Image (cartoon, rainbow, N blue to C red):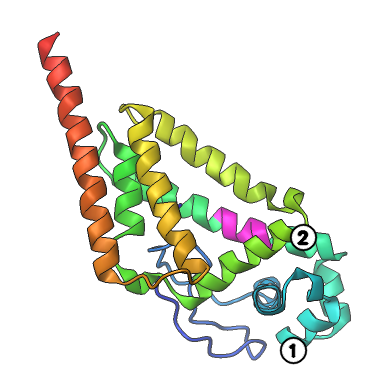
Amino acid sequence: MQLLAHCPEKNRLDGLISDRLDGMHPADCMIRPPHPLKDVLLDAAETVAAREGVSRLTFDAVASEAGVSKGGLLHHFSNKDHLIEAMVKRTADAWRKHFTESYQSVPEGPGRMARAILKCCLTDAQTWTEQLRRSYAAVFAALAHDPALIQPMREAYADLYRLVAEDGLPTNVSETVVTAIDGLWLHWVLRLRPVDQSVMDRLRASLETLLNNAVAEKEKAGALK
């Protein structure tokens, strides 16, 4: 899940500076520091994979997209699978960092992880950006190429669901919140439906009602003991 408005890229190799944001889950709006070359190469790989599919993710295509030599690309990534896994790992690490920081920012109490996900994923539709769509489209392309290569994303979700399991509510409640947001996210990434602020607000209101009712039931049960 989740989880940011990206700024337009100023340049690629002239100083390797970019004003774009990290390829994180929705609402992850921290601006990247100046791009190192490795990030430029991974950006290029994401672009090629999302636009043409992993089958056409060749070193020549990525080097051309990044504006570097093929040798410069090989210096960082020894083969195609290494490149794909690094691309997925960057997205997974950014998502883990985002939901962890959101979790830490939310007050303790029942439903803490669910509240954190609502906060970081369904606050501002403008944070669901085209760069985010590209990053996750590239992850889906990697999945089609070789399911083993998306292990970093599986590990990030394992960490998320560990926090969900410790949420202090019936597991199905927090899981419903996370799964509903993931479903909307999937619709948006695959362009199955438009997602705007009104869609986000309606979903958030429904999930907050579910969450608040579960918290109230827990408090009521505790008071009766």
Residue 145 - label: 2
Q: Give the residue at x 63% y 87%.
A: 12
Q: Residue furthest front?
A: 192
Question: Identity of the amino acid at label 1?
Answer: Gly
Which residue is at the front of the view, 67 or 152? 152
Where residue 149 sits: x, y (%)? 74, 53
Relative to 11, 31 lies left or right: left
User: Does residue 188 sit above or below 181 in this rendering?
Assistant: below
Choose top left, top right, bottom left or bottom right for residue 71.
bottom right
Q: Nearer the viewer, residue 122 or 20?
A: 122
Magenta highlight on residue 144: no
| Region of the chain picked out in magenta, as a range | 87-93
Q: Give the x, y percent position of residue 90.
A: 62, 60
Name the residue that disc number 1 marks.
67
Tell me where residue 95 appears, x and y as whole percent: 50, 55
Looking at the rendered image, the quarter that the C terminus falls into is top left
Can residue 108 be seen by looking at this rendering?
yes
Secondary structure, mark 2, is: helix
